[in-house]
Image (tube, helix red, strand yellow):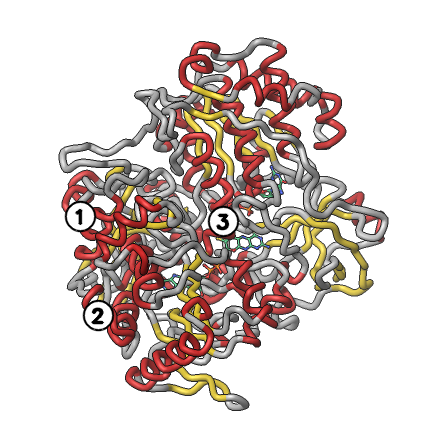
Amino acid sequence: MATLPVPAEKLIAQFGPHLNFAPQEGFAGRDEPDKVVETHCCFCGMQCGIKLLVKNNKVVGFDPWMEFPFNEGRLCPKGVQRYLQNNHPDRLLEPLQRVEGVGFKPMSWEASMEKTIAEIKRIQQTYGNDAFAMLSGVSITNEKSYLVGKFARVALKTRNLDYNGRLCMVSAGAGNKKAFGLDRGSNNYSDLGKAEVIMVCGANVSETFPTLTHWIWQARDNGAKLIVVDPRVIPLARTADLHLDIRPGTDSALYGAMLRYLVEKDLLDHDFINNHTSGFQQTIDAVKDYTLEWAEQVTGIAKEKIAIAAEWWGKAATSFLLHARGIEHHSKGVDNVLGCINLVLATGRIGKPYCGYATITGQGNGQGGREHGHKCDQLPGNRDINNPAHRKYIAEVWGIEESEMPSAGYTAYELIEAIHRGEVKGLISLCFNPLVSLPNNNYVREAFEKLEFYATIDFFMNETARHADIIFPGSLHEEEEGTVTTAEGRVTRIRQAVTPPRHARTDTSILLELAKRLGAGDKFSYNSSEDIFNELRVASRGGTADYYGITYEKIEKNMGVFWPCPTMDHPGTPRLWEDRKFATVDGKAHFNPVLYKDPGEVVDAEYPVVLTTGRVVSQYLSGTQTRRIGKLVNQYPEPLLEIHPELAAKYGIAQRELVKVITRRGEAEFPANIVETIRKDTVFIPYHWPGRKSANQLTPGTLDPISKIPEFKVCACQLVPLRKQAPSPQESHAYDSI
Ligand SMILES: Nc1nc2c(c(=O)[nH]1)N[C@H]1C(S)=C(S)[C@@H](COP(=O)(O)OP(=O)(O)OC[C@H]3O[C@@H](n4cnc5c(=O)[nH]c(N)nc54)[C@H](O)[C@@H]3O)O[C@H]1N2
Ligand SMILES: Nc1nc2c(c(=O)[nH]1)N[C@H]1C(S)=C(S)[C@@H](COP(=O)(O)OP(=O)(O)OC[C@H]3O[C@@H](n4cnc5c(=O)[nH]c(N)nc54)[C@H](O)[C@@H]3O)O[C@H]1N2
Ligand code: SF4
Ligand SMILES: [Mo]
């Protein structure tokens, strides 16, 4: 069961003021902090406001930031522990060099820079510029994302740059661009509070976006009906009015059948459809055979329940649809997203108060980081690297010839395949741990073993970094100034609370130094993060993600500004599409026909059980950060195999007994966690652990053909009970791989 966020005042009332986040008491029982810095949590896309307490250049605690409008002081279990990563004993404090047969040893900055530049030059001179690739992540600020995009194209001169959002936001991004011409959730979340119906598809909100539950509960308090679509009875589903217990990999069948029902009962907004959309007829033609009976057979959800969901959705005056990776991590992730959007458009419930639609952005800067040139086919402002006009505009901003601008490169998993083929020989990464987070990780490991040179920038040693030739000690969230864009589309300020310890340096200064040594120093002469942001504003100007009118000052004055914000006097756009002018070429919202397709791998006699993967509330992503925080580890120490009692009984599996899970990629052992809150044909494993505890030993490298997102959410597996109790987490060395 998830731990749910509790307002600080309630905790204080319950336990007294001796909590390290008592708003009035500050760092209770200890010395007064030197300063209190208003910033944001470093983890998920909610980017909750938090005040960090700083003493002697160390973050020593936190206070709630009650005034920040989205979370109003509320934080989740990760948020209240996040300060512990600052000053952590595992912190990387100097550059490291891997010495074969010995391990890692310290290296000077000068030598590590020299070695890296020499290897980049050697590889690019021998095999061509594109043989040196870059991978990045979006836990970093907008300024750093922008810088990485420019660094790869202008300093490394490679086309091969991609990012970890490829595992996260790209199906939603592609679907949103097709339908609306723009990739952002349509509303700020306060609109949720008065929606009559809320449908949450494949999003374990109470565990993955805990502070967002507040807004859903507010709607429930106002009488809203809540529909949850998930193969598991997730905590949110336990309080829902309707839980649609879907068979993984079948969402588009459900949304297709719901659309057909809306048409059949004429629960449509004809005025909106006729005046503001295109593609309606082809879209409803595509679902004409998707009866409730058919959908029941495909999805495993009782047809009566599907009808109720469609009825509630169709008849509501206001509604909000939210989805996350549960529907997006599929080989037809984009189709699933479009299936949801078709329901929103058919009922015209967008661009009005209390009506909205949004994918819930995952990573801290998953929104901003997918707008400013981090993706292999993208330039700042969400421009297209293949579009001549877009290339020309950005080339001018960057002071290069358009002909020098590389073209689109490989996506993240395709890069791994290119390394296997010998096309890519060298790599630099920051903020990405692909050995844990990419699918089929035995294959990924082999790729890293083939690289001639690999350098990475991180503040902790991670599993992928163990394969690096050079590790640069970079900076934590609280060690640099910048901005992030929250899941709502609100651009907010990240404030530097402390400077990097010992010989660690800011990520920005490392990239700038590398750029200088690659001979591109004149293109990278910034004195501050604000300088970079001001260039980003210009680069994004006229693009769909237009930040031109956003300044640090304006963000601070308004507690964030929602993009698009195209001019200096523009107030920002909390709710999109109120003017009914969509960002598509014809200005209309586009319906897109969705035909049902099976997932990449379906169960058969040999692999008869569906495996799906995801998260738990106390761990974050590949776990590099949260597996180092004791209280979070204690909350859920090792990955467990969630299995229904009936399926467990079929195999004779007892609680906590070890089960070998086998797929076509590999096998791994997990203790059974027998729960009634999962479908009888499906098992679930959280993916935050490395090595032999990694769920990604099992997952397939099947990609969505449009977004190239891996199919993390469905594959076929065998279960083999090992007839022995699992050792305690301590004995099983679940966390000893780093
Ligand atoms: N605690 C915690 N919070 C996080 C993160 C974290 O690692 N830990 N990561 C952040 C990031 S980057 C992301 S992307 C988000 C992810 O947030 P979510 O998408 O909410 O998280 P997941 O657990 O990956 O998957 C969500 C749900 O999808 C369900 N599901 C599986 N298969 C299907 C299917 O075929 N159809 C449907 N409808 N549902 C399915 C699973 O049962 C699961 O409950 O969380 C963010 N917040
Ligand atoms: N099976 C399965 N696999 C999945 C998923 C799933 O649901 N199931 N979910 C996928 C999703 S949605 C995601 S987002 C990916 C995430 O996968 P990753 O991006 O690989 O996961 P992270 O743990 O964020 O790894 C990032 C690394 O960046 C470092 N880091 C964090 N912040 C900074 C910073 O500011 N600067 C620097 N220099 N380094 C930093 C961390 O220490 C960590 O080592 O995993 C994907 N993998
Ligand atoms: S909900 Fe997300 S941003 Fe907010 S405290 Fe939790 S992890 Fe941090
Ligand atoms: Mo994600």
Give the crowd class for mark 3: few <14, some 14-19, many >=20 residues within 10 Å. Answer: many
Instruction: Please tell me which residue is depicted at 57% across the width and 35% down the height of the picture.
Output: 336
Instruction: Please tell me which residue is depicted at 28% across the width and 79% down the height of the picture.
Output: 503
Image quadrant of residue 144?
Answer: bottom left
Give the number of the disc on residue 552.
1
* Cβ at disc 3 under 8 Å from ligand 4: yes
**Residue tagged by mark 3?**
168
**Residue tagged by mark 2?**
521
Label 1 to label 3, Cα distance in Å? 28 Å
Q: Secondary structure at mark 2?
A: helix
In this rendering, the answer to whether 82 lies above or below 102 is above
Q: Nearer the viewer, residue 291 or 64?
A: 291
Which amino acid type is marked by label 2? Gly
Label 1 to label 2, Cα distance in Å? 25 Å
x, y percent for residue 695: 63, 59
Q: Nearer the viewer, residue 146 or 491?
A: 146
Q: Secondary structure at mark 1?
A: helix
